[in-house]
Amino acid sequence: MKKLWRYIGTYSRQTFLAILMVIGEVGMEVSIPFLMTRIVNIGVANGDTPYIVKTGLAMIGMAALSLVFGILVSRFSATAGAGFAKNLRAALFNKVQDFSFANIDKFNTASLVTRLTTDVNNTQMTYMMVTRMFARSPIMLICAVIFAMNINAELAVIFLLVTPVLAVALAVIMSMAYPRFREMLGAYDKMNAAVQEDLIGIHAVKAFVREDYENEKFEKEAGKVRETMLRAERCVIWIMPIMTLLISACIVAIVWFGGNKIIYGSMMAGDLMSFITYTMQILVSLMMFGMVFMMYVVSRASMTRIAEVLEEKPGIVNPSAPIFTVDDGSVEYQNVMFRYREGSGEATLKNINLKINAGESVGIVGSTGSAKTTLAQLLPRLYDINGGKLLVGGHDVRDYDLKTLRDSVAMVLQKNVLFSGSIRDNLRWGDKTATDEEIAEACRIAQAHEFIMGFPNGYDADLVQGGANLSGGQKQRLCIARALLKKPKIMILDDSTSAVDTATDSKIRHNLSSRLAHMTTIIIAQRIASVMDADKIVVLDEGEIKGVGTHEELLRTSAIYNEIYRLQQKGGDKDAV
């Protein structure tokens, strides 16, 4: 909670006011028993009706003020709690935006979603309870103890005997419950991952009639959440019975010893009544403390998980003196080595040496798992290399301002990502200031203009989430047009025409080479036909370059390339290449 305190931000005022209102509420509540003592000891004992009425009215006024203070406490604490959660979510989301792919791989998507939702909700509830109950509990405890000791110090010793027993019990419960709740949140991550995977692949699930399998898988993960939750709850459920036992023991002891004192005349009946009331206030404050403690035990694991994200250092950051201009689209790999995780065994890319001149068209081919996509992802620093140097425009990519570098490199990923909204809105992700003429020109190059104009609203046609109302080829062409609007110096097409026919693919490549000759184009493809006209073709195998040359040269010199070409010419499964 201490680490997360700074995210209260502008809502610290509401927090302070909530605590101030708590002080007022407690002040009124602890004063009422004192007045009740005076009514019994003075008003009733002397038969003074006016005194009883006057003091009774004062008690009613204090009760009314306590009610007003209580309402304000609820209002301010709820506002502060909601604001705190909003700031915390914003901080988490902004932090994730700064993460490199390696950082995201470390946490995984499902876990980050759980931390942004369930963990923040748990932390918000704890914060609200802290501002309402935890602030109230010690104030009431201290005030009630002072008033009780003022009435009879000997009876107040009972509280001192109960306190260490309660402290030991809570400490033991906390040490046992924390790791169990941490395990429970890990189970939540796995359940969310199962849900996410099912929803993303819902078309495949239905196509293969695997609903029963997915239901069983989800029930298994949900069952694990239930089991871990029960193990954790078995610890914290002991808090309330222990506190109830201590409260009952205190009341019995006070009534027993207090009754004896009244019999022997060392204590008045009104004093005992007030003492019992203060005892109840003390024990209620301890019970509130127990409730907050129980919520804290539940949320401590959540707060730790939130802090882990906020304290994670982004794997890729701007240099201290960044370069803000990319001169051209030239690329050079110098003995580049890369692995996704340090100490993870064999490197994904090994001894990569490759030079690409500005404006060149380069194809990259290789079998599945040969690290073709990884090679391209290093250019915009989605990952950082572990060895060697990678130059863009004559400078190391690590010397550039990240925004400048990534604006100069457009990447159309294997998985097409479109967002709900109009086609025009999606295209303007490439350039939010693009004119209608620029948008139409990019779509003509990407062979998308014709099918867009076939929609009733043209470029204003709405897309559902993920562009589900478009075909695979249409989505790919829109993504290419969106990338072109960035006006990049380097364009990376990562198997981004796999869903279009060969004729359309050829037109797109022709447009890129003839109308955007200044732009370096890197085409990652499974089909030889998509790269055979490139200025040079790179053959990758198991993370190493096995050949570089034109189509004709590689047919003569590269056995791997020759085998791929031969299989495809025979009509083999292109996706299996």
Image: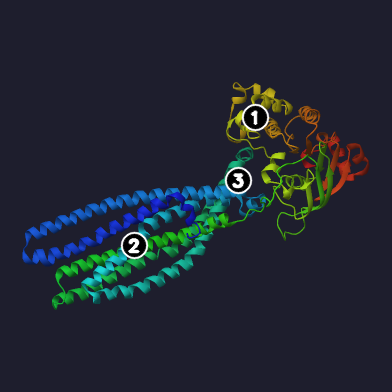
Q: Nearer the viewer, residue 338 or 323?
A: 323
Numbered tag placed on residue 434 in the rendering: 1
Q: Nearer the viewer, mark 1 or mark 2?
A: 1
Identify which residue is drawn at 91% across, 37% down.
552
Q: Is residue 38 visible?
A: yes
Q: Report the amino acid beneath label 1.
A: Ala
Q: Report the amino acid beneath label 3.
A: Glu
Q: Is residue 193 left or right of residue 164?
A: right
Q: Give the total of numbered labels.
A: 3
Residue 46: give x, y in percent of width and height: 6, 66
Residue furthest right in the image: 556
The residue under label 2 is: 137
Q: Report the amino acid beneath label 2.
A: Ser
Q: Badges 3 and 1: C-beta atoms under 8 Å apart?
A: no
User: Where is 430 relative to 286, above or below?
Assistant: above
Residue furthest left in the image: 47
- In the rendered image, which quarter is residue 537 located in? top right
Q: Is residue 266 left or right of residue 68?
A: left
Q: Nearer the viewer, mark 3 or mark 1?
A: 1
Q: Is residue 346 left or right of residue 555?
A: left
The residue under label 3 is: 197
Q: Badges 1 and 2: C-beta atoms under 8 Å apart?
A: no
Q: Counting other residues with Cα less than 10 Å from the Cα at mark 1, is it few (<14), some (14-19), or many (20 or more)?
A: some
Residue furthest front in the image: 321
Q: Earlier in the sequence, mark 3 or mark 1?
A: 3
Distance of label 1 from label 2 (alpha carbons): 59 Å
Identify which residue is drawn at 45% across, 66% down.
174
Identify which residue is drawn at 35% across, 53% down.
18
Q: Earlier in the sequence, mark 2 or mark 3?
A: 2
